[in-house]
Image (cartoon, rainbow, N blue to C red):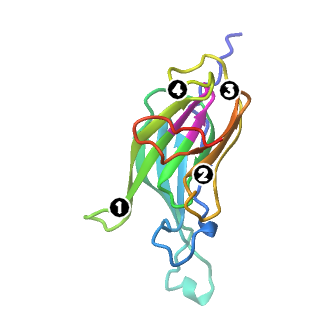
């Protein structure tokens, strides 16, 4: 028959900051329950809301479920299948690795909405890098398998350093080292 190839529209990958490496008194701590995902050809920020108690439930009758609010979204420039995601512990940077070999980094700006008083997120494109052909130009036509994409979790000044391992290369980079282009390899 006329089998259709997967196009990535139905796939969703989620990542969340690990605040375990940040001190609890740190002003860099992201709000609780923040998650990032790529779904429906957009990068989204979500906040998981805790369950709430109604007056009847305070007596132990049960708990009303929490929820998930989308607090920020930005469409992707082109339709791509995401294969890995990672975010920095302070939730200021999000990385996504795509099947076409492209690695993309976004800045994450969290702010309090003036009207509702709730947390809102804006994304801005920081840089993109083609990991498929080891250059910083154009996308490779070959699929790239990313076996690892992870930020450092040691709570030090290296909080924006990340490890990227694909079937073409393994490298350690500083995602925040460049605003205009892909970061230089640290090793």
Helix or strand or loop: what does disc 1 sit on?
strand
Mark 2 vs mark 3, foreground winner is 3
Q: Is residue 68 above or below residue 21?
A: above
- Alpha-carbon distance for marks 2 and 1? 20 Å
**In this view, 70 is above or below 5:** below
Instruction: Answer whether residue 93 is magenta in the image.
Output: no
- Residue 1, disc: none
Q: Earlier in the sequence, mark 3 or mark 4?
A: 4
How far is mark 2 from mark 3, CA to CA?
20 Å
Apparent side of residue 56 relative to residue 21 in the rendered image (left or right): left
Residue 103 part of the magenta segment: yes
How busy is the neighbourhood of tag 2: few (under 14 within 10 Å), some, or many (20 plus)? some
Q: Secondary structure at mark 2?
A: strand
Instruction: Name the outermost residue toward the top.
Output: 1
Circle 4 sits on which residue? 136
Residue at the image point whose x is 50% and y is 68% from the top: 29
Q: Residue under circle 2?
A: 15
The earlier-in-sequence mark between 3 and 1 is 1
| SS category of the residue bearing label 3 | loop
Residue visible at 43% across and 48% down in the picture: 107
Residue at point 58% right, 57% down? 158
Magenta stretch mostly in which secondary structure? Answer: strand
Task: Using the image as rendered, state which of residue 51 and residue 134 is in the foreground.
Answer: 134
Q: Which residue is mark 3?
A: 144
Q: Which residues are magenta?
A: 96-104
Q: CA distance from mark 3 to mark 4?
A: 15 Å
Locate the C terminus and report the quarter of the image it occupies.
Answer: top right
The residue labelled by disc 1 is 111
């Amino acid at each position: 028959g006329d089998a259709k190839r997967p196009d990535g529209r139905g796939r969703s990958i989620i990542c969340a900051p690990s605040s375990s490496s940040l001190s609890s008194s740190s002003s860099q701590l992201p709000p609780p329950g923040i998650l990032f995902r790529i779904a429906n050809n957009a990068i989204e920020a979500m906040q998981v809301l805790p369950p709430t108690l109604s007056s009847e439930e305070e007596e132990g009758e049960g708990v009303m479920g929490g929820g998930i609010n989308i607090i920020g979204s930005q469409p992707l420039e082109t339709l791509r299948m995401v294969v890995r995601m990672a975010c920095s512990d302070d939730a200021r940077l999000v990385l996504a690795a795509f099947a076409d070999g492209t690695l993309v980094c976004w800045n994450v700006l969290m702010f309090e909405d003036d009207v509702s008083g709730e947390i809102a997120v804006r994304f801005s494109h920081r840089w993109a890098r083609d990991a498929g052909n080891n250059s910083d130009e154009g996308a490779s036509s070959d699929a790239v398998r990313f076996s690892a994409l992870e930020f450092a979790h040691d709570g030090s000044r290296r909080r924006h350093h990340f490890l990227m391992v694909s079937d073409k290369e393994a490298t350690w980079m500083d995602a925040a080292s460049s605003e205009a282009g892909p970061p230089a390899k640290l090793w």
